[in-house]
């Protein structure tokens, strides 16, 4: 793996950038975590695979909409769509990870030099959207308050297999005050395109989590007295399931370095 | 095309049959319109295609969830799933249409003798589910009241193309009393898995419909005074788009002869 990429930093107010401006800045070389960029617009995960695996992955997403909510697909030969108008999926994300045979090969701010005509890109919803909705509705989001990355866990919950892809669900955990668990369920269930309602409320052991203070990914958060751990399907699931199958070639966004889309968060709200 | 298939008729109360019982009866040779069978359970459209077209079709469904809401997919080699427990997709629908090069070849009650190992089956939501919800909420459904098939129209609304598949949207029309249009929108928007909210309310000409009394498919219904024509995306869209591409081989359910699934209608309701 290459050394850590250090790019320019953006000096203005990232929340005020339009998605198109943000993508231009990343295309021009800025490397940054995208949390807080282009407020009100949906950010997304990327998984790019050769056409050969594309049907199986699309089917995996259809069968597992909670961990793998698809916002859009770029067919082989396509590098843009209405989710990234005038954009280029090969350069508009601040940082990419390139995998060969399921192993991380490099971390780069641009993948045009390794791009192939047979690559299909899957744009997958991200929990940033529902966290905004939780905060706006007065439900606290602990890992944000504690300045940490969300804790994520491998579980004993199986996904529905599809072709070459199978494996357990990865979940994210947010401690929610007992009196607001119902609100958290109600609010996130209105966002099925970004993981939707929780998959589990309470007892971590029941879904195979040995120690809720030792996450498999992200960072541990303190669980305040009076809160209940609530678990949502996590976008790390498809990435983990894909790498398990050791695809000959794959590209993903680097964690925290998301695609900023032209879709407003509110667009993904159902009644 | 073969002569019309005349099978046994079911003499009992079809609404009281479990989905599994209904599928057994059809497997054993009964040929019947399925309207009214297994009350409370979702009925579905079938499109079966060779693996070669499967990615493009799955992508078409992902991009066009309103006309093409996927409830499930049977991969090549699979003939059953949790939507039809202990079932067989090749025999459990009362009547099938077999197409060769986009042309109707035969209408048969069983497709086991033409089945191939490379066939992928797409199970697509049907408006029966939301019509039940409309009626239960006191919104009249005119074509049912008038004892007719729902009127359907080709429109000027484009679908999002995917691979080899493209073409205009087909819509179904239901005249709704002006005071209940908002209710009809609210109720059907809670069923995104079965076409969801209307795509158009009012003026048929605005979506390229020349004469609302001459549908392209189904039957004309009287539009009572005080009602507004309301248009929903229709499951005939994917069938029409698929045949337009002249696939070498395809199987669909015969109109009105649906797959009865183990999923309850209510399971497809969002908050």
Image: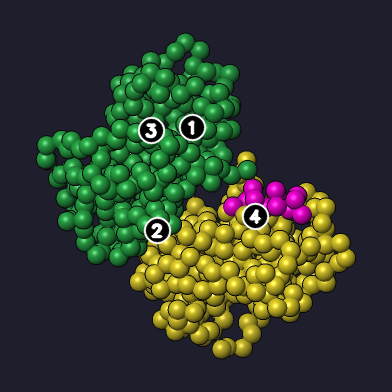
Chain colours: A yellow, B green
Q: Which mark is residue A231?
A: none
Q: Which mark is residue B81?
A: 2
Q: Residues within 10 Å of mark 1 (few under 14, many from 20)?
A: some
Marks 2 and 3, Cα distance to the nearest angstrom?
A: 26 Å
Circle 4 sits on which residue?
Answer: A197
Marks 1 and 3, Cα distance to the nearest angstrom?
A: 18 Å
Q: Nearer the viewer, mark 4 or mark 1?
A: 1
Marks 3 and 4, Cα distance to the nearest angstrom?
A: 38 Å
Q: Is residue A168 left or right of residue A164?
A: right
Dot 3: element: loop
Dot 2: element: loop
Residue name at image x 58 percent, y 69 percent: A157
Circle 1 sits on which residue?
Answer: B132
Residue name at image x 63 percent, y 60 percent: A199
Q: Which mark is residue B13?
A: 3
In the rendered image, residues at marks 3 and 4 fall on the same chain = no
Q: Position of residue A21 (x, y in %)?
A: 62, 58
Q: Is residue B47 left or right of residue B203?
A: left
In the rendered image, residues at marks 2 and 3 fall on the same chain = yes
Q: Residues within 10 Å of mark 2 (few under 14, many from 20)?
A: some
Q: Does the residue at mark 4 contact the one at mark 2 (Cβ under 8 Å)?
A: no
């Amino acid at each position: 793996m290459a050394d850590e990429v250090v790019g320019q930093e953006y000096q203005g107010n990232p929340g005020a950038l339009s998605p198109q401006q943000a993508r231009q800045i990343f295309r021009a070389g800025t490397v940054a975590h995208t949390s807080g960029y282009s407020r009100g617009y949906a950010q997304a995960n990327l998984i790019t695979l050769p056409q050969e695996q594309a049907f199986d992955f699309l089917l995996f997403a259809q069968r597992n909409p909670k961990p793998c909510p698809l916002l859009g697909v770029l067919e082989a030969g396509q590098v843009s769509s209405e989710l990234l108008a005038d954009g280029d999926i090969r350069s508009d994300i601040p940082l990419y990870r390139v995998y060969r045979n399921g192993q991380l090969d490099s971390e780069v701010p641009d993948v045009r030099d390794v791009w192939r005509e047979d690559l299909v890109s899957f744009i997958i919803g991200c929990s940033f959207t529902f966290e905004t909705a939780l905060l706006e509705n007065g439900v606290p989001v602990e890992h944000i308050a504690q300045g940490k990355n969300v804790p994520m866990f491998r579980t004993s919950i199986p996904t529905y297999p599809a072709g070459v892809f199978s494996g357990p669900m990865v979940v994210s955990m947010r401690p929610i005050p007992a009196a607001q668990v119902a609100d958290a369920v109600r609010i996130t269930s209105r966002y099925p395109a970004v993981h939707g309602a929780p998959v589990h409320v309470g007892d971590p052991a029941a879904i195979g989590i040995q120690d809720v203070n030792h996450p498999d990914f992200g960072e541990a958060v303190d669980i305040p007295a009076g809160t209940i751990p609530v678990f949502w399907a996590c976008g790390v699931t498809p990435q983990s399931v894909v790498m398990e199958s050791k695809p000959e070639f794959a590209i993903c966004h680097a964690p925290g370095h998301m695609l900023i889309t032209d879709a407003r968060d509110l667009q993904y709200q159902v009644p």
